[in-house]
Image (spheres, rainbow, N blue to C red):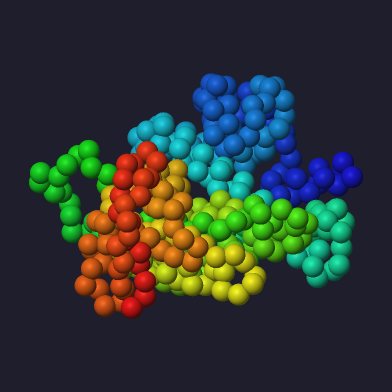
Amino acid sequence: MTDDIARLEDEILGGSRTLSLRDLAERVGVDVAEAQAFWRAMGFPGTGPDTAVFTEDDAAALQRFVELITADRVGRSAAVSLTRALGHSTERLVLWQVEALVEDAVARLDLDDTTARLLILDRLHEFAPVLEAQLVHSWRRQMAAMAGRIAAEFGEARSIQGADEDALPLERSVGFADMVAFTTRTAGFGSHELATFVHRFETTARDVISSLGGRVVKTIGDAVLFVADDVETGALIGLGLAREIGAGDASPPVRVAVTWGRLLSRFGDVFGPIVNIAARLTDIAEPGTVLTDPATAELLAGNPRFTLQPLPERDLPGLGTMAPVRIREA
């Protein structure tokens, strides 16, 4: 098995592990600490300076990292952040992909979990080229979509006189959808039943959000955080999630909240007061309903697609009192 794994790793990595951290540093012309920092930014534990764990492709990757900095194209902290983004995202991606393959083998071939994992391990060399090609294709499409959004939003705004430099940079609609009674509902589930349950929730949520023009920021088991570029789209997504999730007996309903305002986007996440408000409103929403704050409700007022129902004031921990507004489809 050890020899088989070594051959599989060589095939996936594009070569044998013949270089140490010291070799890597000397090859690229940096000190060992800088090479170690790059390796850790990728999301891997530190390694001894003379242990041969690196390949020629690792040396090329470190070279690209260093050239970004030395060519003054980005600062060092930005280069580290870009590397961390890749490490974090691809670690989650690989985990998702392997678990999906295992789940498929269990379901289609009627295997137990251990046997399915060993089968997928044996077939990884078959899947890897396809998954790698699809990753590059998806990255290109996502980068093109991002470029289009930036051009549409900021293309004509080279500079804005008198702009508040401390203001959060992006105006977005932010929404949370949180499944009701997730812990109670899933307490007695086995692994397959739990996986099916979570998969159904995430698939439905992502389908609703993307089909209506929003983007998933992250999912956390029983909750999803999304953004949209305008307030109407955000409200429509919120209503779509409340309608589609929990329709029938397959999953419980969700509590939803949507807000509009300025936020900061960093590390694949979003931050700012409107995010906090949306989270707190989700906590107090009734199952199957969508809440918003008065400022966002004012922007939706008069839109024929919605009806708005002001509710009594509530205390939102850390934010004070607020009179939430329920959004309904007209």
Q: Looking at the image, can residue 226 be seen?
A: no
In the current view of this chain or complex, which residue is farthest to the right? Answer: 1
Q: Looking at the image, can residue 34 be seen?
A: yes
> In the rendered image, which quarter is residue 297 located in?
bottom left
Give the x, y percent position of residue 130. 66, 63
Give me the residue at 31% from left, 67% from top: 309
Position of the C terminus by quadrant: bottom left
Give me the residue at 40% from left, 53% from top: 281
Q: Is residue 241 above or below residue 33?
A: below
> In the rendered image, which quarter is residue 199 located in?
bottom right
Give the x, y percent position of residue 262. 28, 50
Give the x, y percent position of residue 14. 69, 47
In the current view of this chain or complex, which residue is farthest to the front? Answer: 312
How many tags in the picture?
A: 0
Q: Is residue 330 above or below residue 321?
A: below
Give me the residue at 81% from left, 63% from top: 106
Give the x, y percent position of residue 229. 32, 62
Q: Is residue 4 above or below residue 240?
A: above
> In the rendered image, which quarter is residue 123 located in?
bottom right
Give me the residue at 62% from left, 56% from top: 182
Position of the N terminus by quadrant: top right
For the residue pair 297 and 215, the one nearer the viewer reads as 297
For the residue pair 64 and 115, the one nearer the viewer reads as 115
For the residue pair 137 and 54, the one nearer the viewer reads as 137
